Image: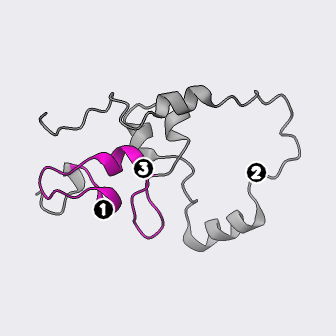
Amino acid sequence: YDNTFNFWNDYLGLSTLVAKRDSPPYRGSFAGLDLLSADRRRKLTQRGKPEPKVCVFCRNNGAPEEVYGTHILKTADGRVLCPILRAYTCPLCSANGDNAHTIKYCPLSR
């Protein structure tokens, strides 16, 4: 085992979890629905950007929406939440879990 991250390996069994989820398709209407609650609108104007709703790491790496829509990449204070990235260990500094990152974002890389 060479300790490299394989994106296509289902390390956490998420495909089984997604297959078990059976949510009925939405058949209603969005007419008249305020998609931004007052609380979210306030946060948006305070910071200038919306809170993430999906994991951009998984989305950018080609995972299906059923995967990247189930979690976000990080908390507001920088703690990694993405289970795929948390399982990855940086080959340069050995960081993983809460502080996981790819080589591109490693403080030891140039």
Identity of the residue drawn at 11% across and 35% down: 2
Q: How far apart are marks 2 and 1 (CA)?
A: 33 Å
Residue 43 vs residue 76, the one in the foreground: 76
* 66 with respect to 79 (left or right): right
* 43 with respect to 88 (left or right): right
* 46 with respect to 108 (left or right): right
Q: Distance between the residues labelled 3 and 2?
A: 25 Å
Q: Can residue 65 be seen in this view?
A: no
Residue 33 vs residue 26, the one in the foreground: 26
- Residue 78, magenta (yes or no): yes
Secondary structure under the numbered disc 1 in the rendered image: helix
Label 3 or label 2, whichever comes before in sequence order: 2
Residue 42 picture quarter:
bottom right
- Kind of residue at badge 3: Cys
Mark 3, Cα crowd under 10 Å, few <14 / some 14-19 / many 20+, is: many
Label 2 or label 1, whichever comes before in sequence order: 2
Mark 1, Cα crowd under 10 Å, few <14 / some 14-19 / many 20+, is: some
Dot 3 corresponds to which residue?
82
Residue 13 vs residue 29, the one in the foreground: 13
Dot 2 corresponds to which residue?
35
Identity of the residue drawn at 27% across and 46% down: 88
The region drawn magenta spans 73-102
Q: Which mark is on residue 99?
A: 1
- Kind of residue at badge 2: Leu
Q: Is the magenta stretch mostly helix, strand or loop?
A: loop
Q: Please, is residue 61 above or below residue 32 in the view?
A: above
- Kind of residue at badge 1: Asn
